[in-house]
Amino acid sequence: MDSFAGTPRDGHASDSGRGGSFEGDICSYCQEPWGTGRGCFMCGAFLVRRAQHERLRSRVNGRRSESVQDRLKRALGRIELHRPRSLKASLVRCQLGIRDLEPLLVEAGPFPYGRHLLYQNQGIESLVMNWPSGAECAPHDHGSSWGWVHILEGEAEHSVYQLDVRGVPRVRRKRLVRAGGWLFAPKGLIHSMGNPTSNRLVTLHVYVPCITGMRVYDPSRCASCVVRDDCGAWWPADDRQIVQISPPSSAGDLPR
């Protein structure tokens, strides 16, 4: 078998039966960074055959050259992945980063965030959202959907609400989530997100099934409305985007 050139570090000695060592922080075959205590980040092992290494390298590089839509289709297209834990694991393996999504970001304009639909099929949808400094969306639910939010860049303030006896949302808890963090949004959750920093915030969202019947709340009006599927988490300026409007106190079917 071929061996890696270099000197072992971190106390890992070469296995003379299989050969192999590494030098510095870079794999001597593919020039990729080593994972901490795990060997080559790409190979996933300290000692591999050159042929096996090249197959892995070709596979990873091929995935990197795929479009964002193709990567999400491959990751999200299987119905058995539509469970919280397996869906998150699939998204992690997809390895979408800010560099991949930068060309797809939409400016917020008059809204709290710019939104771009990345992928959608009959059972799942994924969007990327671009939040300017100081932006905050309205409290809202996701209809009958649940999903994950991944913080790609910046810091998000996440607020969870509970409806009072009049059906008006009141903040139950808040927390900051930094880049790399994940938020799970179960069915029926009423929440809001915002960007409290001076830098932009970029978030990746995946929902199962595709969101329909989202209810947006306006505590200042003591009112809520169900919005069209192409509307974001804000009170629509265009009444044509409102499907139904009602004061929360008269909406007996609102989630509590």
Image: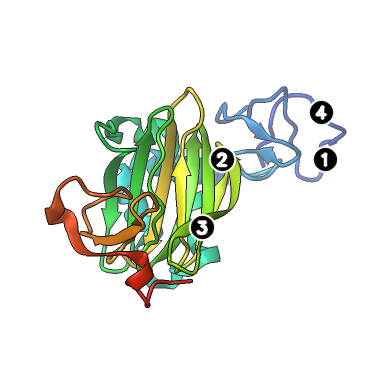
Q: Position of residue 182 (x, y in %)?
A: 55, 49
65 in relation to 149, above or below: above
Q: Amino acid at mark 4?
A: Arg
Instruction: Report which residue position mark 1 lands on.
Output: 16
Q: Secondary structure at mark 2?
A: loop
Whether residue 144 can be seen here:
no
Q: Secondary structure at mark 3?
A: strand
Label 2, label 1: how far apart the Cα atoms are? 39 Å
Instruction: Report which residue position mark 3 lands on.
Output: 161
Camera-side residue of 51 and 197: 197
- Describe residue 138's horizontal placement relative to residue 173 as left or right: left
Instruction: Report which residue position mark 4 lands on.
Output: 9
Between disc 3 and disc 2, the foreground one is 3
Q: Residues within 10 Å of mark 3 (few under 14, many from 20)?
A: many
Between disc 4 and disc 2, the foreground one is 2
Residue at 28% x, 37% y is: 111
Earlier sequence position, callout 4 versus callout 3: 4
Label 3, label 2: how far apart the Cα atoms are? 24 Å
Q: Secondary structure at mark 1?
A: loop
Q: Are marks 2 and 1 in contact (CB under 8 Å)?
A: no
Q: How is the image coloured?
A: rainbow
Residue at 42% x, 36% y is: 202
Q: Amino acid at mark 3?
A: Tyr
Between disc 1 and disc 4, the foreground one is 4
Between disc 2 and disc 1, the foreground one is 2
Earlier sequence position, callout 2 versus callout 1: 1
